[in-house]
Image (cartoon, helix red, strand yellow):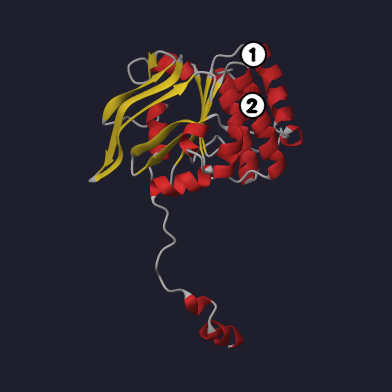
Amino acid sequence: MESALTLNALTKRFGTKVAVDQLSLQVPAGSMFGLVGPNGAGKTTTLSMATGLLRPDAGQAVVLGHDVWADPPRAKAAMGVLPDGLRLFDRLSGRELITYSGRLRRVPEEQIQQRCAALLDALGLTEDADTLVVDYSAGMTKKIALACALVHGPRLLVLDEPFEAVDPVSGDRIRTILRNFVASSGTVIFSSHVMELVENLCDRVAVIGDGHLLANGTLEEVRAGASLQERFLQLVGGDAGSADLSWLTGPAGDQRSEA
């Protein structure tokens, strides 16, 4: 099976903290791949190294046969990336931002205009196409950033929390776009904290914790007969905590409210 993204022993340290520790992973071409893990597990660091945004201390990332760090132009040309906390040129309108992204990607001008109109329509942004991005809501900003990641027609999409701050209607639009992308021989890898979303959308899943790969395979293999939520908690050691918070609902809390 062809690999769209291969990570070989990726490692990254921040001071004394090992954020990602010799993580190896293969994302098969044509798959919808979910990357899940608790806060601080190393998901964003892993995806940043995989896409050329953060140089690893050791290891290798290969996109469709091209080493991200040895041959960045070819590797990055094949990718559309939606990173966490992306800073946009938000003094451009939505239409201008997509157009600018298309030009950076050397898309022919006539195609840029066609693709821009199609993306704005598909993401429900046509009415706000000429509004400055700085005036967009968080969800609208997420959608315009996704449009910029798609405009050059990549073969691999790497998305960090693409559904965060997105309303249900927009979320359904994005799911449709991603499903159609995979059906047309594209590959998607995205991170999420929402197990139900990953379970409903992905055919393959990887779970990471403390910078290590804890599970990887088809959805059924990773779930191992349980729900993804249950399996996730088993793997990462879910703990409700032992602190006594009875004061929040006890008599003292009632007296405080009356005061």
How many dots with numbers? 2
Mark before the other along the chain sequence, 1 or 2 = 1
Direction left: furthest residue: 16
Q: Which corner quadrant of the image does residue 136 belong to?
A: top right
Q: Position of residue 108 (x, y in %)?
A: 62, 11
Horizontally, residue 181 falls left or right of residue 15, namely right
At x 36%, y 15%, the residue is 71
Labels 1, 2: front one: 2
> Can you say whether 119 is above or below 84 in the image?
above
Res. 179 mark:
2
Amino acid carrying mark 1 in the image = Glu
Q: Which residue lies at the image location 72% right of the left edge and 23% below the top edge?
A: 118
Give the residue at x 65% y 33%.
174
- Judged left or right of residue 258, residue 41 is left
Q: Residue at x 57, y 38 (%)?
A: 199
- Amino acid found under the numbered disc labelled 2: Arg
On residue 109, which mark appears? 1
Q: Residues within 10 Å of mark 1 (few under 14, many from 20)?
A: few
Q: Nearer the viewer, residue 255 or 220?
A: 220
Q: Secondary structure at mark 2?
A: helix
Quadrant in the picture for residue 212: top left
Measuring from the top left, give residue 121's x and y in whole percent. 74, 28
Q: From this viewpoint, is residue 181 visible?
A: yes
Question: Can I make out residue 91 in this image?
Answer: no
Q: Secondary structure at mark 1?
A: helix
